[in-house]
Image (cartoon, helix red, strand yellow):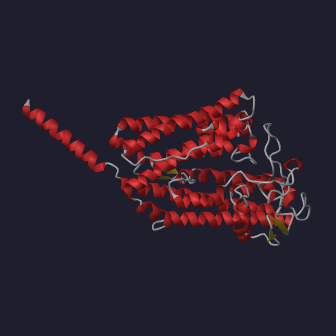
Amino acid sequence: MRLIKSALLTASALVMAGTAANAATKAEALDNYGDIALAIYEDSLASAKDLKKAIDALVANPSEETLAAARQAWLQSRNPYQQSEVYRFGNAIVDDWEGKVNAWPLDEGMIDYTDAGYGTESEANPYYAANVIANPTFTAGGEEIDATTITAELLADQLQEAGEVEANVATGYHAIEFLLWGQDLNGTNAGAGTRPATDFDTENCSGGNCDRRVEYLQAVTDLLISDLEDMVANWKDGGDARKELADKGEDGGVATILTGMGSLSYGELAGERMKLGLMLNDPEEEHDCFSDNTHNSHYYDVVGINNVFHGTYTRLDGSKVEGASLKELIAEKDPAVAAELEEKLQASLAAFEALKTRAETVEAYDQMIGEGNDEGNAVVQAAIDALIDQTASIQRAVQTLELEQIAFEGSDSLDNPSAVFE
């Protein structure tokens, strides 16, 4: 019996040694995290280039068909990009850059014509109704702007956050979205923006200034591509984002992953993008408000959180980037905590799949958050609750990995609701 017991112990020791030898290391998990970032930004860049082709086709032959194709290309371009948002917050290079490509909400009157209900001025924003497309020169905030030629430099250097007003969004996905769809004037009724293709037809122009609208659309699309090229370079081997991550050390790098997961889950998505709009029942507080694509933007944010936990990303061509993961690092310390977080992430993904399905079969997201829509409100609230629940488990993972306490992004809508109505 002693010999048998000794043999069993030896076999067990060998298995444990083998498991330890094959265990994921922090360095491997961080390398894979960087590889996934690179793949996501490469896919975002590729889809932005597809968007440019569709916009060029619209400009060459303005029709409802080419406009519909450009809109579809924009919608497709959002899916990979939104999966990158989990790289914000912990990665300063990403967070400092993000406003160039995904800032919202925007005061659309700075860019183009608006409905009379929009108004003509705002005490908070001297550029509120500047209408760059209609005005080659204009004065706002005491500054004279020469917009005779609409260029990427004009948009990025003079108009983006002009006057230090965050709502002056001149660049990125949402400026393009507004140009392709126009305002959504339906409130919490069905329907998205309905800009006509003739707004881009210089020979049969509706809306006025079609030549300048085309200039703006092409310049802002070129700028989006340029900005995405910069971020791809940042995540290549030796790129600035990789260096910044490495400089934090292994524990600092793992903390960065968890900071992105927790901050996007809690303050950004559950709070600013969802709970705030639900509290106010305000369709203007939805992320992709001109196209009614908010359900997809939210869903792919959640997919992105799952990606970095599992260490895997499915590319646009169907291939996978996968490797050592945060999940493995947590499981090595405490399998129960890893299983708990896995369960919470799956629950939130299911809640957002339900939200997405409802948006595609019953009503758009801006209708779901409308006042008096108890059923729609409940679907949105369930998704918010799932995010809050998973954030608590993310914080437990921080403790399990014995990392320094992380302060996740907050939101008044969650932490101090009364302040929202002050």
- Identify the residue at image location x=51%, y=59%: 38
Q: Quadrant of the N terminus?
A: top left
Q: Nearer the viewer, residue 197 or 336?
A: 336
In the displayed structure, 397 sits above or below 168; it is above
Q: Quadrant of the C terminus?
A: top right
Q: Residue furthest front?
A: 422
Query: Residue 126, how many percent across, how many down?
Result: 80, 59
Query: Residue 120, how many percent across, how many down?
Result: 87, 54
Q: Nearer the viewer, residue 71 or 125?
A: 125
Q: Residue furthest left?
A: 2
In the displayed structure, 12 sits above or below 83; it is above
Residue 348 seen in the figure: no
Q: Would residue 308 be found to the left or right of residue 75 on screen?
A: left
Name the image quarter holding residue 145: bottom right
Q: How many marks?
A: 0
Q: Would residue 330 be found to the left or right of residue 280 on screen?
A: left
Q: Would residue 352 be found to the left or right of residue 309 on screen?
A: right
In the displayed structure, 120 sits above or below 410; it is below
Name the image quarter holding residue 328: top left
Q: Nearer the viewer, residue 310 or 101?
A: 101
Residue 287 seen in the figure: yes
Query: Residue 248, how many percent across, how many down?
Result: 41, 59
Q: Would residue 393 be found to the left or right of residue 165 on screen?
A: left
Query: Residue 276, how many percent across, how many down?
Result: 67, 40
Name the image quarter holding residue 365: top right
In the displayed structure, 110 sits above or below 297; it is below
